[in-house]
Amino acid sequence: QKEVEQDPGPLSVPEGAIVSLNCTYSNSAFQYFMWYRQYSRKGPELLMYTYSSGNKEDGRFTAQVDKSSKYISLFIRDSQPSDSATYLCAMSGAGGTSYGKLTFGQGTILTVHP
Amino acid sequence: GAVVSQHPSRVICKSGTSVKIECRSLDFQATTMFWYRQFPKQSLMLMATSNEGSKATYEQGVEKDKFLINHASLTLSTLTVTSAHPEDSSFYICSARTGPAADTQYFGPGTRLTVL
C-alpha cells in the first residue's frame, strides 16, 4: 500500500465548474499537508499549505484536512482553462528525519475546457 | 523571490556515459536541497537529501554510487548520473528549502534525461 493515494484521473470539467481533488494517506505521522500544481514539463509550484486538521481558503482554492479519516481535499471554484494542470498532494511529518521531507501523491490530471 | 533553476533542461546521452545536472537557488541560500525523480504519469519520488558541506542522505533503494550528489555551496547542488542506462531515463527535479517548515520548498523546472 502506498503511503499516499491519489486518483490520477484524468478529470475533465467545463469552465466554471467546481473541482474536487482528493488524497488519502496511511501514515498517521503526517502533520503538514500541501497541494502543488504542475504544468507539463515544469516543476511543481505550491498552491496551498495546511497544518493538521481544518480548512484553509485562498481565493478560488479551498484545502480541507481530516486527520481522523486520513483524507485531504482541494476544491477549485469557478474553474478556468488556466487551471488545467496536474495537481499533486504532498505531506510531511512533524519532526525528526521526516521533517521537511515530502511524500507525494500520484497527481491528478485536470483539464478545464472552455 | 525563491527561484530555483536547473541546468540543463533536457539532455540526451548514450548508454554508459555520465550526466551532471545542476540545481541552483538564485536569490537565496539553501542549506538543504532535495532531488526527486518523476516517471511519466507518476508522482515525484524523493531520491536524496543534499546538505551543504556534508554527505547526501539517500532514500531506500536509491544507489548512492550511481547517483552522486555534491552540495559544495549554499546555492548549488549537483546530481551526477553515472554510467547511465535507458532505465534511468526520467524527469529529475530538485528543490531548495528556504527554511525548516514543510512549505518552504521551492522546486526547479526539472531536467528531462533520455538515455539511448
Image (cartoon, rainbow, N blue to C red):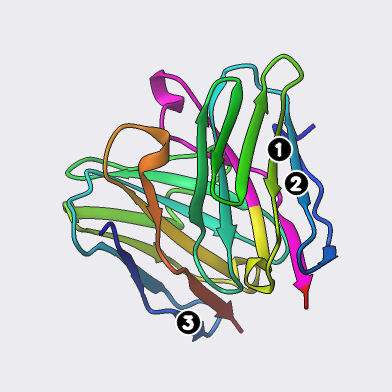
Please indicate, yes or no, whether residue B22 appears anywhere in the rendered image.
Answer: no
Nearest to N terminus: mark 1 or mark 2: 2
Magenta region: which residues?
A: A88-112
Q: In this view, does A70 lie above or below B115?
A: above
Q: Which residue lies furthest to the top in this view?
A: A68
Q: In which quarter of the image is the C terminus of chain B?
A: bottom right
Q: In which quarter of the image is the N terminus of chain B?
A: bottom left
At horizontal 71% and vertical 37% (from top left) the residue drawn is A73
At horizontal 48% and vertical 82% (from top left) the residue drawn is B10
Where does the image place residue B46, in percent across and percent down from the top left? 52, 46
Residue sitting nearer the eye, A104 or B81: A104
Where does the image place residue B7, in percent across and percent down from the top left? 35, 75
Q: Same subunit under labels 1 and 2?
A: yes
Q: In this view, does A106 lie above or below B113?
A: above
Amino acid type, label 2 = Leu
Kind of element beneath mark 3: strand
Left or right of B39? Residue B52 is left
Please indicate, yes or no, whether residue B19 appears anywhere in the rendered image.
Answer: yes
Q: Same subunit under labels 3 and 2?
A: no
